[in-house]
Amino acid sequence: MDAHIGSVDGAALAADNGAVGCPASSPGCPMASSHPAAAVSAGEASLGRHLARRLVQVGVSDVFAVPGDFNLTLLDHLIAEPGLRLVGCCNELNAGYAADGYARARGVGACAVTFTVGGLSVLNAIAGAYSENLPVICIAGGPNSNDYGTNRILHHTIGLPDFSQELRCFQTVTCHQAVVTNLEDAHEQIDTAIATALRESKPVYLSISCNLPGLPHPTFSRDPVPFFLAPRLSNKMGLEAAVEATIEFLNKAVKPVLVGGPKLRVAKAGKAFVDLVDASGYAYGVMPSAKGLVPETHPHFIGTYWGAVSTAFCAEIVESADAYLFAGPIFNDYSSVGYSFLLKKDKAIIVQPERVIVGNGPAFGCVMMKEFLSELAKRVKKNTTAFENYKRIFVPEGSPLESEPNEPLRVNVLFKHVQKMLDGNSAVIAETGDSWFNCQKLKLPDGCGYEFQMQYGSIGWSVGALLGYAQGAKDKRVIACIGDGSFQVTAQDVSTMLRCAQNSIIFLINNGGYTIEVEIHDGPYNVIKNWNYTGLVDAIHNGEGNCWTAKVKCEEELTAAISTALGEKKDCLCFIEVIAHKDDTSKELLEWGSRVSAANSRPPNPQ
């Protein structure tokens, strides 16, 4: 698995020693070069250009922005930076979702908005990035520095002479906040914010007063020295103790298994996890939100572990094991299918990015997941029992029933054809809803990307995320599966995809409402107004850019549309509206919905 920006195992900005993104002056941070930083011209020695150069340096080539009067001057300086492109979005929410998608593809993303009205609009997307452990740099144009500390009331506020509302809102959904109101410490504040985002793999908030971006300062007079974060290292005694306790636990087990979780990404431990699989011979699966983080073509891969809605035969092997090691899991009501996992704590080893818990104890802190898994691979005893058991019970999955001529299209037939479209140059974006479950059953070829937002589960996320991911992974053709209800939330930025000349394929599944919510709790609020979706996209296209749309109602029309999208329209943004019956859902959604509903409707505990 090659290491590159956005890969599970590190960014291209990593040095040979594994260091990633921090100020070069910090203790333990090696300099990239012994040569002095080059001087810059007076016109470029400004705060705005310093920020722009820093963004380019850490791997950001595109900033997703919505202009407003407090950030206009800053945007001028971002545009002026070679290697940095400003992508104008239709609204701040989508700009934030796009930065989220970009961070998934490239390892770090950035968005730029205006004060308060823009900041509070992007807040929901930043909260989602926080929940998914994505380093997103959220840049807000702030009030003139002279207005701080006065009793003035500004526009774009709630009418009080208090400019801290936006900052206070971001404090709970970012790992670091910086408000730059003077030039003296602007250099340090910007560098610290960007370094913290990279180190913590979480969003940061950076507010810059609107009168500062064009001003020069001696601290901006040279190109910023490339910076690196010293790698986090394990406590050696703790690491040794954790490995010993885990080896003892696993080696006495009869049929141990491994399960990868979503925090493999933040720990950059994907390769170490696969090395452990190779060394141990264990069967391994992934939690649903870890799909795409480890290879699915490995012979010991047994599928997605998702409790009662796992892929066939995976849950039986995992839950019957006498020891299971979970690497980077997130256990919530959705991933546990309404808290219905049949797992026992005394059989589990939980490996988090910096902590290991063996059974009911002991627990070991300051132990880095990547180092821990690597050391474990050197000492674990090979045991293929669980995988042999899986092979004994495994029955190959069947195919959907053959369609009659012109029979209304079934969703399982759609995904049979989506599966055939996938290769190493593809990526899949799955929107919140039934696409979660249908896409989870896709078998990903080596190199095929896969993303969805399970922890936060914000409907509409996929449109902006598709824009950002496609912009960050131009070597891939991205296939997005989006429900009609979700699309109505964020549809506008299809226009930005056209402006960026993207060639993604969008399958719009039109089944008349919020199907995932129907299966949790039905009501008239889950029915939406039907749109002419292809007509809407054609109107957005308006003859500018490369766009092709199709509406399909049967398998014959679907295969023809896919053939066109992969053939003569391969360079176009392709939008295929799939007409489906409102009750056509995966069996997994039916099961999952009933269990989540039961968890949601538990009565209050007796007082």
Image (spheres, rainbow, N blue to C red):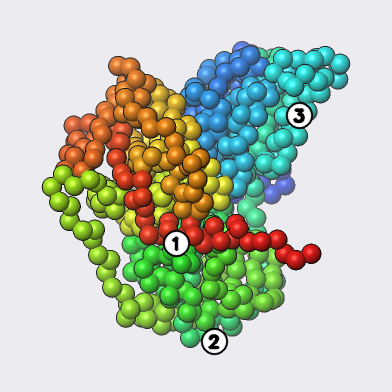
**With respect to residue 28, does 221 lie above or below?**
above
For residue 259, say whether it is visible. Answer: yes
Precedes in sequence: disc 2 or disc 1: 2
Q: Which of 544 and 107 lies nearest the eye of the viewer?
A: 544
- Residues at discs 1 and 3 in contact (Cβ within 8 Å): no
Foreground: disc 1 or disc 3: 1
Q: Reading the chain from its start, which is encountered first: label 1 or label 3?
A: 3
Q: Which residue was labeled with disc 3?
A: 165
* Residue 40 in view: no
Q: Secondary structure at mark 2?
A: loop
Q: Position of residue 207 (x, y in %)?
A: 69, 27
The secondary element bearing badge 1 is classed as helix
Q: CA distance from mark 3 to mark 2?
A: 56 Å
The percent position of residue 296, horizontal first and vertical second, equals 37, 61
Q: CA distance from mark 2 to mark 1?
A: 35 Å
Residue 19 in the image, given as x and y percentages of width and height: 59, 49
**Callout 2 amino acid:** Lys
Q: Secondary structure at mark 3?
A: helix
Q: Residue at x 69, y 71 (%)?
A: 363
The residue under label 2 is 252
What label sits on residue 591 in the rendered view?
1
